Amino acid sequence: MQIAVIGHAQATPGEYEAAYTAGRLIAGNGAVLICGGLGGVMEAACRGAKEAGGTTVGILPGTEGGNPCIDITIRTGLGHARNVLVVLSADAVIAVGGKYGTLSEIAIALKTGRPVYGLGTWDIEGVIPCSSPEDAVMRAVQDATRSRTA
Amino acid sequence: MQIAVIGHAQATPGEYEAAYTAGRLIAGNGAVLICGGLGGVMEAACRGAKEAGGTTVGILPGTEGGNPCIDITIRTGLGHARNVLVVLSADAVIAVGGKYGTLSEIAIALKTGRPVYGLGTWDIEGVIPCSSPEDAVMRAVQDATRSRTA
Amino acid sequence: MQIAVIGHAQATPGEYEAAYTAGRLIAGNGAVLICGGLGGVMEAACRGAKEAGGTTVGILPGTEGGNPCIDITIRTGLGHARNVLVVLSADAVIAVGGKYGTLSEIAIALKTGRPVYGLGTWDIEGVIPCSSPEDAVMRAVQDATRSRTA
Amino acid sequence: MQIAVIGHAQATPGEYEAAYTAGRLIAGNGAVLICGGLGGVMEAACRGAKEAGGTTVGILPGTEGGNPCIDITIRTGLGHARNVLVVLSADAVIAVGGKYGTLSEIAIALKTGRPVYGLGTWDIEGVIPCSSPEDAVMRAVQDATRSRTA
């Protein structure tokens, strides 16, 4: 089971906290965390997942670097096109805040039938707003479990 | 000068007409038409551009096919990631209607600083709503000219 | 009909001359020249094609720039992955000299069934060595014509 | 430390055995196995790594599937362009047999400065022929360790 947390590389304190908690819970539920490998929301989710003993995957736009909490580094060199891989590799997606890059990921997730749970993110038809990281992860895990056993 | 027309592969009659007119005007202004190479809005824009004596470029998600009005066929095999190339290759973008694929293109265009002119499309901050294809193309040509001479 | 000329961004004088002649002949035969959009062999082929009144397409690894003889600029931001698009977009490929990047293009061309004509390039099974640019273009045009009418 | 095993989706018995052993040893040395996620050489390496308690990553050309021994599935939908990601994500590469797809990966690995150790694979300048999977993995681990601590 692979769950993505998407959001901006510069997070507000609230976004950082939400992503961190989401990461902890994703790992606590035995799922692999997928993200874009950079800072902000991505790093927060990785940090949470690592502290809960989970596995983190960073799919980078470039060919080096990545935040210090990544276990598996996928170096793509694809630039913006790597956004597509982040959501395709996830069974469910949690969006925390986010700007245009996050919007492009939400769009591809919805186009390819992946559920998107939102925490203070874009108000797009199809995104399911959640009240808390706990709420978002619980639903994402249920969806991912269902799609894996379907 | 390269201007993209983006939208869904199944167009409503109104969308088809708008995209066709936009294509005609893009060609009439001496710009190259960039699109995703498939049917619907993409084909309508190509048809308009060809009838006005212009040049059309289709950037396909697959490795074959494309609508019959394409002059230059870029076969990518990249799937959804080809959306990124359509907007990166354009100096300005005109969005006609559209669903999630179009939304992903709008998002990448705005992220990378390309102006997006909208005709009945997603209401996203940064998209400039236009009253007609004439209005959209006039503005797009002005922007593209400016960015080329900057 | 779209024919690619591939090779290194730093060309020897002999490679530059061969690519220039190939570009002239490709345009003279009414085919569109596809290339990677940078300097050296790519620029030489574009220059030849332009001087013969042809159309040139540069598929760039980055998101800006390109040599001055490109008509249609495809900005990918894909880095090395753009090599795949250059050969997929061609009906036949002419390789002039070249290093590892060119080798990757030859490999994908052969994998996807595109004929590869070689001028002083990698000696790989499947590459058809040619005695001159004239020889290479003549064969490439024949192949491309055949695949288009198949 | 991430080491890729590359090769064809249809392996000969000898190639399967070599890839399986390489996978076991990669995992035994604490490295993550990176591969293209399909059958043949890729599956053999994954099987070996899993039996030695390691972690396996499959970077798929499509958007679903993958061999049954993959822990982390990267779904790209990029087609042939995913080959680039396999080698960019590796600190060192072991090539077992292989056809044109493998050749494209060898080329990109050498272009981007990754060491390539060969077991019955393409005879390309820069590929270091090895006498056994043990030999190949020992050298790859040394290289990967060095590049990680550089």
Image (cartoon, coloured by chain):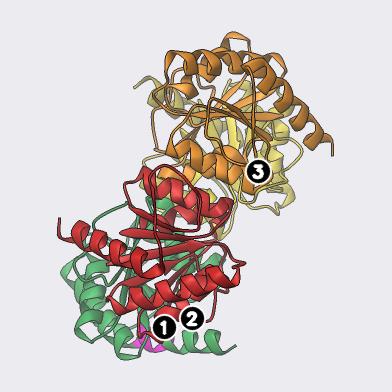
Chain colours: A green, B yellow, C orange, D red
Which residue is disc 1 drawn over?
A: D50
Q: Nearer the viewer, residue A117 or A72?
A: A72
Which residue is disc 3 drawn over?
A: B37
Label 2 – label 1 distance at C-alpha: 7 Å
Q: Looking at the image, which residue is at 72% across and 17% down?
A: C29
Q: Is residue B86 visible?
A: no
Secondary element under disc 3, as helix, strand or loop, is: loop
Which residue is disc 2 drawn over?
A: D69
Residue B65 coordinates in the image, percent (x, y): 73, 46
Residue A50 coordinates in the image, percent (x, y): 22, 80
| Among numbered discs 2 and 1, the one appearing first in the sequence | 1
In this view, D110 is above or below C94: below
Q: Is residue D6 magenta?
A: no
Q: Is residue A136 magenta?
A: yes
Q: Nearer the viewer, residue D88 or C32?
A: D88
Asked if the residues shown at circle 2 and circle 1 are in contact, with their CB atoms under 8 angstroms apart, the answer is yes
In this view, D28 is above or below B70: below
In the image: residue B36, left or right of residue A11: right
Residue flagged by tag 3: what amino acid is it?
Gly
Secondary element under disc 2, as helix, strand or loop, is: loop
Q: Look at the image and give the residue range highlighted in magenta.
A: A135-140
Secondary element under disc 1, as helix, strand or loop, is: helix
